[in-house]
Structures are given as C-alpha cells and as structure tokens.
Image (cartoon, rainbow, N blue to C red):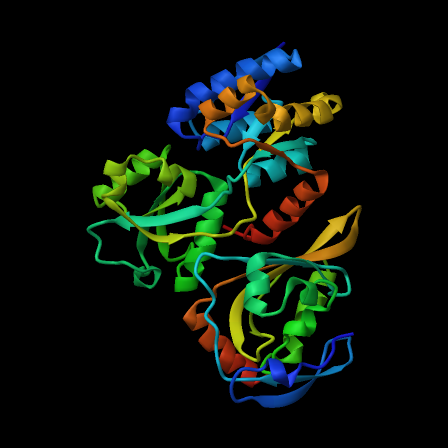
Amino acid sequence: MPHMFTISPDFPPNSLAGWYIFNTWFQKNTGLNIHLNLYNSFEEQTIAIDNNKNDIVYVNPVDAVRLVRDKGFLPIARVKNRLDEVVIAVSEENPISMMCGLKPDLKLAMTANPDVNMISMMLLEAVDLNNSNVVKTTYDSYIIVVKNILKGEADAGLFLAKAYDDLSNVVKKQLKILLRSDVEELYHSLLIGPELADRQDEIQTLLVSMTDNPVGKGVLEALDFEGWLKIENEEMEFMIDLIDTLVPDTD
Amino acid sequence: MLEDMNVDDIVGDYKEATLKLYNLHSRKIFYTETEVSYPEGKLIVSTTDTKGVITHANPIFVEMAGYTRDELIGHNHSILRHPDMPSVAFKDLWNTVNEGRKWEGIVKNLRKDGCYYWVKATVIPNVRNGEIVSYTSVRRKPSVSAVDESIKLYKTLT
C-alpha cells in the first residue's frame, strides 16, 4: 500500500505540476512509495482526513492543529517566507474603498478554507459584521469567488492572500483590496502521520537541506517555494494554542 | 514586581493614579487622553505563565505597548493596566480562564508613553495533561460601537 499524500485545495493551480515533481523527488529521496492524492474541495479533503485516508499532508493551520491533536500527526516543515494572510476584496467598481464602508447584510463570497474564513470574520468584527448579519456563500475555488464579485452576486470576497496575489493581473485590476491582514503567526504545514513517526527527523533534515543542491532547488522552484523551515514541536504547540484562541465558540 | 511608571516616558499632559493590581502590589501610573488607533489587519499575540507573567510577545504587541520586548518579557501583563478598566473585569477574566474557559472582552490598555489603545481580547488557558500551564491571548481591533458600550459599562463598575 502506498502512503497517501495530499495538499490543501487552496494551492494555486499553476503549482500543480510542481507538487507532482516534488512527490517524485520525495519518493526517490525517502524510498517511500507515495501517491499524491488531490481533492477538489476542502469538504472532500476533510472527509478523507477524518477517514484516515492520508498520512502525509500539507495543510492550513486549522487542519494542521486538528491532525496533530486528534490524529497524532507530527510536524515536519513550513515554507520559508510564506505566511497565511487574508485579503478582503471588492469589485473595483464598488464605491466602498475602506472596511468601514461595509455594512450589515453584506454578501460574502468565500471558499471553505477554514483559516481564511476564521481570520476574515475576526477582522470584519471591527466594523460590526459577524455571522449574524452577513450572508456567506461558499464556492469551490477563489476564481469562482472572483466571478461572483464581478457579477455582483457578492459584495466582497475572502481570499488567502497568496491565492489573491496569484490571480492574473487582468482579474486583479477588476478588484480592490479593502484589507490585507498582517497576522504573521499562521502558516501551512507539512505533517506526517503517526505510522511515519520514526522518519520525522530524517524527513525534516531532507526538506530543510533541499536548497543545498541543484536538484532540490529545482524542485522548490517548481513549487515557487524559497525553501522549507523545520517546525519544532513547541512551535506546533504554540500554533495549537493560538488556533484554540482564534476559533469561535460557535459559528 | 512591576515598577512605577516613569513620568519622563509620558508624552503630553498627564494624570496620575495608583492602581491596586489584581493579585499584585500597587503601582503608580501616569496616563494621558491620547488614543493610539489599533492598526487594521493585525493581531496582538502573547502568552503568559500561570501568574500572568509575559513569556511571548509578537512584534505588534511590542509596538502597541510602547515598551521594548525586554521590558515586556518577564513582567506581569498588568503592565498594560489602565485606570479606566474596572478591576471586576480582570477578576472575571482570571476566574473564567482558571475554570478552563475562554474569556473575551473589550479592554483599554495603557502604553508606556501614557497613551491608550482599545482591543478586543480573547484569552484561553493552555492545558497540558489536564493542567493549566500557561495562557494565550489574542487581541484585535474592536468595533467603535463595542468600545462605546464598554466605556459606558466600565464607568458603572468598580
């Protein structure tokens, strides 16, 4: 049975090939038989994770915390200079240009990315918007979020900042950023399941040293990554505490 | 032990007060009527030990508090206590987190320079092996209406 590897559905579509290249490199350098298993939505991925379908994952902070605490996953690495920030954007034609212009009954378009939605709703609280006075619609991808903003079906969209930045310039010219977060504490993580626990140190060393050789560098370039940083266990504990603080008691 | 504030650090006209800090000694503070706006999109993150001593402060915490990191780490979180905050709010905070529950509230914080800033604070106990070992606190920009309500409420509390 191959090990199953999945990545968060919010990865940019243009990095898909990069993940396949990474998986090939990863198998060669670990000797593990690994199948890259991609899901079309967060919902599909969550169901798969809950059913223990994957033992190597690259996931957002909320899912990482759940996997570490509930499933015994272990932290491996995070991407250098890649933090999870959010963008709240409206159509360029929208007369609103500041967060304080957003009013109750706001129609929000979003994906099911849990950390983006959690942070965004927290930031919207500053203008008295919350789950009780906004209308939220969840879509499968950020590009569909954009389409709904541009069609006027949604007043504003919630984006992972990296996903927003990776939209084409043509698309971005039709949008206007009201807020870009600067949380600086949250990031996607590569984790391994408990059955691979005895490989944790080896895999961490392998990933962190990818920048030391041309082949590893090439793989990182295909992913648009600067490199990997080891996640210490205490860093993951901190992330768990932080997410516990951020997650609302009731949605 | 928190030292008294230094009047030389204060910017502008100020008032003086002596605060009886929760579970601590008294502290002389100086404060002004100048508000520093909470920046959009940022979160203040800190951790304290079980006695409220700061063990982690992210950059925006340092920036908003006006102290250096070294002046914050190792000192009690009460270093930010503003005289307009009723002591009952902090009693409620400690009672709540010591029962293992999350506490949320609007808090007026005092900066080193005597200015103040409002936050919406969330505090949770960090539990390891069934025991509370520390607390994590996240602060974010509060809404204007939440601050206005808190100002009215806190005036009625002691």
Does residue B108 lie above or below A191 as drawn? below
x and y percentages locating residue A50 in the rendered image? 59, 29
Quarter placement of the N terminus of chain A: top right
Q: Residue at x 61, y 50 (%)?
A: A242
| Occupied quadrant, residue A227 | top right
Does residue B66 lie above or below A86 as drawn? below
Nearer to the camera, A169 or A164: A169
The number of discs equals 0
Q: Residue at x 55, y 20 (%)?
A: A216
Q: Residue at x 42, y 54 (%)?
A: A131
Nearer to the camera, B151 or B109: B109
x and y percentages locating residue A197 in the rendered image? 73, 25
In the picture, measured across the screen, residue B86 lies left or right of residue A83, that is right
Does residue B98 lie above or below A74 as drawn? below
In the picture, measured across the screen, residue A193 lies left or right of residue B34, that is right
- Look at the image and tell me whether residue A25 can be seen: yes
Nearer to the camera, A128 or A116: A116
| Occupied quadrant, residue A159 | top left
- Look at the image and tell me whether residue B101 can be seen: no
x and y percentages locating residue B65 in the rendered image? 58, 69
x and y percentages locating residue B54 in the rendered image? 71, 62
Does residue B73 lie above or below B30 as drawn? above
